[in-house]
Image: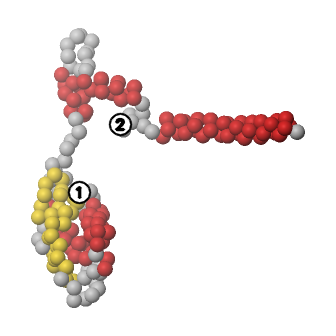
Amino acid sequence: MASSSATAQTRTLKETLIPVGFLSLLVAGSGGFLGTTLVEIPGSNTVAEAGAGAKAAVEPTTPDHGKLDHENASKATAASQKVVPSLQLKALAPIVTNLASPEKTWIRMQGSIVYDAAALPHPDIMASQIMADVIAFLRTQTVASIEGAAGLRRLQEDPNERVLIRSNGNVHEIIIETLVVQ
């Protein structure tokens, strides 16, 4: 009877290990497949293409007569360099308005906007539109909604979303410098 018990345990162990091993291999294989197909290097599809692209951008092209083609080389160099926006800071006038609840509570906020000077030719006009949006937003807030760390984070994030939409991405953010609730 002892031998039949050992045989039953061996059979149960085999019946358990075979499906578990098969499922482990299946999961590892599908994870590897998804990892290689979903992950890609920014700007190219493979590491080899990324290396070839960098090499092509560095080496100038040579025409048939053996001289360097400086015009094509300068175009390749200019294309490989990214254009960095010229960010500037513009201080906004202090915003003073009342909150939605309680009605006799006032808020004073002073801040600045960070904008791309090349893309935004008239920052004063955009600043006044942003101030109007922030005032409209602040008038919908209550004291309870801006209390604590989460309230201050929301007070920073919501106007930033409005600013991005209003400016079509030319104003990067609004920075709150001072905030007084009275």
Q: Which mark is residue 43?
A: 2
Provide residue 136's location: percent of width, then percent of height.
25, 77
Q: Which corner quadrant of the image does residue 131 belong to?
A: bottom left
Q: Nearer the viewer, residue 29 or 24?
A: 24
Identify the image quadrant of the N terminus.
top right
Q: Residues within 10 Å of mark 2 (few under 14, many from 20)?
A: few
Q: Name the foreground residue: 160 vs 10.
A: 10
Secondary structure at numbered mark 2: loop
Amino acid type at mark 2: Gly
Residue at x 49%, y 35% (from the top left corner) = 36
Residue where numbered disc 1 is placed: 172
Whether residue 65 sits left or right of residue 35 in the image: it is left
Expressed as whole percent of the image width and height from the top left, the position of residue 103 reads: 25, 88
The quarter of the picture where residue 15 lies is top right
The one of 55 and 74 positioned closer to us in this rendering: 55
Q: Residue furthest top?
A: 65
Q: Label 2 near label 1: C-beta < 8 Å?
A: no
Q: Which residue is rendered at x = 19% and y = 66% of the image?
A: 176
Q: x, y percentage for residue 35?
A: 50, 38
In the depicted structure, whether residue 34 falls above or below residue 160:
above
Instruction: Name the quadrant containing residue 169.
Output: bottom left
What is the three-letter code of the residue carrying label 1? Answer: His
Q: Quadrant of the C terminus?
A: bottom left
